[in-house]
């Protein structure tokens, strides 16, 4: 009989934040020490680190110019920690860091110095994600972005950068996390260069994926009109997060409000191949939203769905956000109708 093999390696899912000081090797020795010390103080002072340490749910992996934090309590923890660090660094503009977040398998190991350490694919991929960024960037793997996308508060901050080739020919789908106050909205240089190298094929694909969200038809009363306008704008904003889609601006699409004609004609006026449109009907305290996505070149209806929601004064915006989020996720998410 073959010998039995057993392994003492115990993997678990870790939520990893990898941090790196940009341009560290070019700094003077005393500047390196000062920046590392200040960064350590900022990291230790974050609420997420304090909470995770108190619960015994934090592992650390120091590196010469930064380090990795492995949270074992929540997928949100490394993202919230990154935002805390970004906020604190506003007072220290001389320290430029980039950060990458990924959730994946990790395990505790003992290194050659008999010190406890942490390793695993979760660490490696978080570092690869971080390596795609420049100073100020908070980049996320697709797994992390998919987890966050289910929550309304994260939706506006997730910006799809598409796939990029990293070390050893591995391709990662990366998202940029930023708001008006935090993060870096600029396209990372690594992705900018890759985009320039593939400009011809990207342009062709972009032309095929022009999408227009036409004004939703409503019953005409003020409340329904407001709901319809807001829904269309939210869907347009949501679809615009995906870099592989080119979305007609809400203001341009709104000019066709009330116009009659077939979808091909309306789409031609906007220069879009795909048209998303729908209607609203009110009944008592409820509302029914019908939506459909059409390929105007072939005339095929690619997708259609109906959503029934309560429409009370206190929940009108919640209903609007919920329906818009579901439509965007269905049309353009990782496994959406217009998948990249």
Image (tube, rainbow, N blue to C red):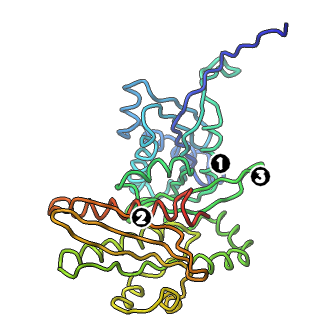
Q: Is residue 175 left or right of residue 282?
A: right
Of 120 and 18, nearer the camera is: 120
Q: Is residue 293 left or right of residue 8?
A: left
Q: Name the residue carrying label 3.
A: 169
Q: Label 3, label 2: how many angstroms apart (C-alpha)? A: 39 Å
Crowding near pointer 3: few (<14 within 10 Å), some, many (20+)?
Answer: few
Secondary structure beneath disc 3?
helix
Give the image location of residue 325, x and y in percent.
Answer: 39, 61
Quarter of the view holding residue 198: bottom right
The residue drawn where x is 60% and y is 24% is 108
Secondary structure beneath disc 1?
helix
Q: Earlier in the sequence, mark 3 or mark 2?
A: 3
Give the image location of residue 18, x and y in percent.
Answer: 56, 43
The residue drawn where x is 64% and y is 52% is 131
The answer to whether mark 3 and mark 2 are in CB contact below 8 A is no
Quadrant that contains the C terminus: bottom right
Of 319 and 96, nearer the camera is: 319
Quarter of the view holding residue 284: bottom left
Give the image location of residue 222, x and y in percent.
Answer: 17, 79
Q: Nearer the viewer, mark 3 or mark 2?
A: 2
Q: Label 2, label 1: how many angstroms apart (C-alpha)? A: 38 Å
Of 106 and 243, nearer the camera is: 243
Give the image location of residue 164, x and y in percent.
Answer: 67, 59
Q: Is residue 160 left or right of residue 132?
A: left
Q: Name the residue carrying label 2.
A: 305
């Amino acid at each position: 009989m073959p010998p039995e093999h057993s392994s003492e390696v115990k993997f678990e899912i870790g939520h990893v934040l990898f941090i790196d000081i940009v341009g560290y090797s070019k700094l003077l020795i005393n500047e390196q020490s000062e920046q590392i010390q200040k960064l350590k103080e900022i990291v230790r002072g974050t609420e997420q680190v304090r909470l995770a340490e108190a619960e015994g749910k934090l592992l650390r992996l120091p590196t010469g110019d930064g380090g990795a934090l492995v949270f074992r309590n929540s997928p949100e923890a490394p993202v919230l920690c990154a935002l805390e660090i970004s906020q604190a660094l506003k007072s220290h503009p001389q320290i430029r860091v980039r950060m990458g977040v990924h959730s994946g398998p990790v395990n505790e190991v003992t290194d050659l110095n008999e010190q406890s350490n942490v390793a695993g694919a979760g660490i490696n991929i978080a570092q690869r994600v971080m390596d795609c960024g420049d100073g100020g960037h908070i980049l996320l793997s697709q797994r992390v972005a998919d987890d966050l996308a289910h929550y309304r508060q994260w939706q506006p901050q997730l910006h799809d950068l598409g796939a990029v080739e990293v070390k050893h020919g591995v391709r990662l789908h990366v998202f940029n996390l930023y708001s008006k106050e935090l993060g870096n909205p600029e396209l990372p240089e690594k992705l900018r260069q890759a985009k320039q190298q593939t400009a011809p094929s990207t342009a062709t694909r972009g032309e095929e994926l022009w999408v227009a969200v036409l004004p939703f038809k409503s019953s005409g009363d003020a409340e329904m009109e407001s709901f319809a306008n807001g829904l269309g704008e939210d869907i347009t904003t949501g679809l615009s997060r995906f870099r592989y889609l080119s979305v007609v601006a809400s203001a341009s699409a709104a000019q066709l409000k009330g116009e009659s004609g077939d979808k091909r004609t309306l789409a031609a006026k906007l220069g879009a191949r795909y048209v998303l449109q729908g209607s609203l009907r009110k009944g008592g305290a409820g509302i029914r939203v019908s939506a459909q996505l059409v390929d105007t070149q072939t005339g095929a209806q690619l997708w259609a769905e109906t959503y029934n929601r309560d429409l009370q004064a206190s929940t009108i915006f919640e209903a609007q956000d919920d329906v818009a989020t579901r439509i965007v996720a269905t049309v353009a998410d990782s496994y959406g109708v217009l998948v990249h």
